[in-house]
Structures are given as structure tokens and as C-alpha cells.
Image (spheres, helix red, strand yellow):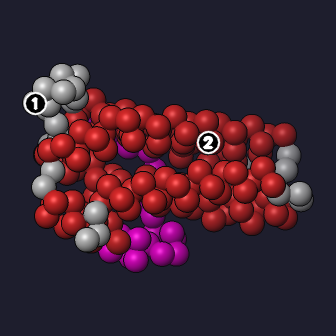
Amino acid sequence: MADIIELIYADHDWLRRQFFRLDDARSAAELAAIWTLLSARLDTHAAAEESVFYPALLKHGGRDDPGNPEADPQDETEDAITDHNAIRDAVRESRRHQPGTTDWFTAVFKARSENGEHLDEEEREAMPDFIKSASLELRHELGMRWLQFYADHESTSHVDARNLDAGEYIEEHS
């Protein structure tokens, strides 16, 4: 089964490992090689979540979860869009600087920090809420859409990395 939750977790793991690889880089060329892939994947990952996962969370999220009375798919989606925008901003800023420079490291650290907080929050709130409320069939269907999204955006050249308005997004997908 192509479970959307497992696929998102796998992506999160990949992102975290790439940030760790930056710590092992010994030259600007190594930093650039790692960051080129990682920054593109950050953009793609956010776009994939916004195309596949969050519209489903808004429709099927755990609003009435007695185990978590604060579960609110709209709040979780708004948080995610805001986080994605902050990550995108940091990635864009990093691309204005040469890898290895102080300004580049500042932007990459911002992306790393924002991304880490986002992944932790998503894994603690949105994903468990979705697991409780979504059928296995839906999770599989979304998993297949996730895989298709990545196949369609393999080169990342057609990924829309513009910031989104969380309110407009929620209204469109609710």
C-alpha cells in the first residue's frame, strides 16, 4: 500500500538527513551540491503537501477527535502554509548568496530551523489527526497521488515555490 503518511514520513527523514549532510561538508562546492538538491526538495515537498495532503486533511481531518479536542484541520493547515512560506523565504534568501558565506549559512540555518519545527509539529499534530480520521483506502489513494506528484515534478523545474495566503488556501480547499 502506498500510504500517504508513510511517504510523508519518508520525505521528512530524507530532509533531516540532508541537513545533517551539510554539517559534514568541507568545501563550498560540497555545500552547494548538497544544498542544491535539498533546497529543491524543500520546495517540492511543500508543494506536494499543499497539493495532496492538506486538501485531504481539511476535508477528512480529526475535528471531532475526543482524544484531542484541540484538533482543528484549518488551524493545522494554516500553520503548515505559514511554515512552508517561512521555509520558502529562507531558501530564496540562501539562493542570493554564495554557498559557504556567512549570509548563506544564516539563510540555510533559518531554513533548517523553520523546517525542523514544521516537521515536528506536523508529525505531532496533523499526521496523527489524519491517521485517526482517514480510511486506509483514502491514505492509499493519496499516496498514489503523492507518488504521481513527485514523478511529475522530478526535475523540480515546474514546482510553484511562491508563498501562499493561508486563508485563501483554506477557503479554496475546504
Give the image location of residue 3, x and y in percent.
28, 63
Quadrant for residue 141, please give it.
bottom left
- Residue 111 image label: 2
Task: Give the amino acid type for the residue marked by disc 2 in the picture.
Answer: Ala
- Residue 64 image label: 1
* Stretch of the chain drawn in magenta: 148-167
Q: In this rendering, does residue 159 appear at all? A: yes
Q: In this rendering, does residue 39 appear at all? A: no
- The answer to whether 130 is drawn above or below residue 35 in the figure is above
Majority secondary structure in the magenta region: loop
**Residue that appears at 38% across and 35% down:** 124
Give the image location of residue 156, x and y in percent.
51, 69
Give the image location of residue 169, x and y in percent.
27, 43
- Residue 150 image label: none
As for residue 150 lying within the magenta part, the answer is yes
Locate the C terminus by quadrant.
top left
Quadrant for residue 128, please give it.
top left
Front residue of this view, candidates 167 and 30: 30
**Residue that appears at 81% across and 55% down:** 24
**Residue that appears at 79% across and 58% down:** 31
Q: Nearer the viewer, mark 2 or mark 1?
A: 1
**Residue that appears at 22% across and 35% down:** 73
Q: Residue furthest left?
A: 64
Instruction: Answer with left or right where residue 71 lies relative to residue 163.
Output: left
